[in-house]
Amino acid sequence: MMKQEFTVTVYTENQIGLLNRIAIMFSRRKINIESLNTSPSEIEGIHRFTIVINELEEVVKKLARQIEKQVEVLKAYYNTNDEIVWQELALYKVPTDEIAEKVKVERLLREYGARAVVIRKDYTVFETTGQREEINKLIAVLEPYGLIEFVRSARVAIIKASSGFHSKLKEFEKREPGEEVIENEYLGQGDQVFTM
């Protein structure tokens, strides 16, 4: 079996220190995190972690089960790239005079789906979204013109086959409704009920 890229999606309560505990689970197993994104999810009060790793499926399966054992974790999924829709965002800063003089900027923007977000005398910042390979191609194109700075966001991903975690949560609540608070019927009658 070979290592492959997996996206681990974790739905959690928003608790301080949870990110650290989850990260420790990866470092203990000597698994490098390629990309990590945390954001609110479609459910109010529930956060979503999107973690990209290269690993064997068996290891990822065990890891997802371990993550789910954390009290604040509601569910952990893992998926291959074929099972998700995903994007990353990138910003590229290049010298304005170089790019304006030597490149057909409009063609560059069209070809790579980029757009200029800041144009100043000294530099221009381009933005593009896509998959890592597409983003890396634009780095290679811009490098000869003096790429000053480059940054890429973490992956954001949606699971293709999922009907959404929100519906799963609703189903669970129907099956196992939260305990109602029941008034203690013996309140005020302690001496009659509890005899020593």
Image (tube, helix red, strand yellow):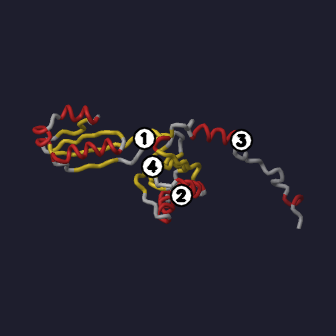
Label 3, label 2: how many angstroms apart (C-alpha)? 31 Å
Q: Secondary structure at mark 2?
A: helix
Residue shown at 44% from the left, 54% from the top: 54
| Residue occupied by mark 4 | 38
Q: Position of residue 99 (x, y in %)?
A: 14, 40
Residue type, numbered disc 3: Arg
Q: Earlier in the sequence, mark 3 or mark 2?
A: 2
Q: Secondary structure at mark 3?
A: helix
Residue type, numbered disc 1: Trp
- Front residue of 30/2: it is 2
Tag in front: 4 or 1: 1
Q: Secondary structure at mark 4?
A: strand
Tag count in the figure?
4
| Residue occupied by mark 1 | 86
Residue type, numbered disc 2: Val
**Contact check, label 2 and label 1, Cβ < 8 Å:** no
Tag in front: 2 or 1: 2
Tag in front: 3 or 2: 2
**Contact check, label 3 and label 2, Cβ < 8 Å:** no
Crowd band around label 2 with a 10 angstrom C-alpha radius: few (<14), some (14–19), many (20+)? few
Which of the 4 image quarters holds residue 128?
top left
| Residue occupied by mark 2 | 59
Tag in front: 1 or 3: 1
Q: Earlier in the sequence, mark 2 or mark 4?
A: 4
Q: Position of residue 123 (x, y in %)?
A: 16, 44
**Contact check, label 1 and label 3, Cβ < 8 Å:** no
Q: Earlier in the sequence, mark 3 or mark 4?
A: 4
Label 3, label 4: how many angstroms apart (C-alpha)? 29 Å
Residue shown at 22% from the left, 39% from the top: 118
| Residue occupied by mark 3 | 175
Q: Position of residue 111 (x, y in %)?
A: 25, 33
